[in-house]
Amino acid sequence: MTIDITERGQQELAKLDLGENGFLRINVVPGGCSGMTYTAAVDTDFGADDVAVFENGPLRIVTDEGSAIFLEGLKIDFSDDLIRSGFRFTNPNASGSCGCGASFAG
């Protein structure tokens, strides 16, 4: 599984209070105008059908098996521009996305 996190993205993720057993959970759920969207939240509950898709020091990203196929090639970046600040998820394997970039088609 290949997930690329830019240096700026890693710096901002490091600011999250993950605690000793915490990780960032990224899942793909139905939604948005293109069909699917990413959700992200800090979590500590690693379930039976979860898989770690990125590990670098204390930073760990986890997803469920169903979402994992949509995360291959995902790039995570952070932007602090005035219009749309925050984490940005870009996946070159997505077949399309909506105009605002909040959802994608697999």
Image (cartoon, helix red, strand yellow):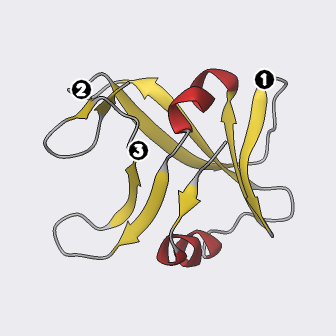
* Image point (47%, 58%), residue name: 76
Residue at image position (43%, 65%) is 77
Q: Quadrant of the N terminus?
A: top right
Q: Which residue is depicted at the point 81% across and 37% down?
A: 46
Identity of the amino acid at label 2?
Ser
Closer to the chain start, of discs 3 and 2, is 2
Q: Position of residue 25 (x, y in %)?
A: 63, 44
Q: Secondary structure at mark 1?
A: loop
Placement of 53 over or under 103, stated as above or below: below
Q: CA distance from mark 2 to mark 1?
A: 26 Å
Tag 1 or tag 2, which sits nearer the N-term? Answer: 2
**Picture layout, residue 36 above or below residue 14:** above
Residue picked out by circle 3: 91
Disc 3, disc 2: CB below 8 Å?
no
CA distance separating discs 1 and 3: 23 Å
Question: Could you give the CA–CA distance between mark 3 and mark 2, rounded to whole angstroms?
Answer: 14 Å
Q: Position of residue 63 (x, y in %)?
A: 66, 36
Q: Which residue is mark 1?
A: 49
Dot 3 falls on a residue whose secondary structure is loop
Check disc 2 and report the residue beneath it: 34
Q: Residue 6 location in percent, x, y?
A: 50, 70
Query: Is residue 13 rendered to the left or right of residue 47?
Result: left
88 versus 17 height, above or below: above
Decide which of 55, 81 is in the foreground and name it. Answer: 55
Within 10 angstroms of label 1, few (less than 14), some, or many (20 or more) residues? few
User: What residue do we see at 78% from left, 47% from top?
Assistant: 44
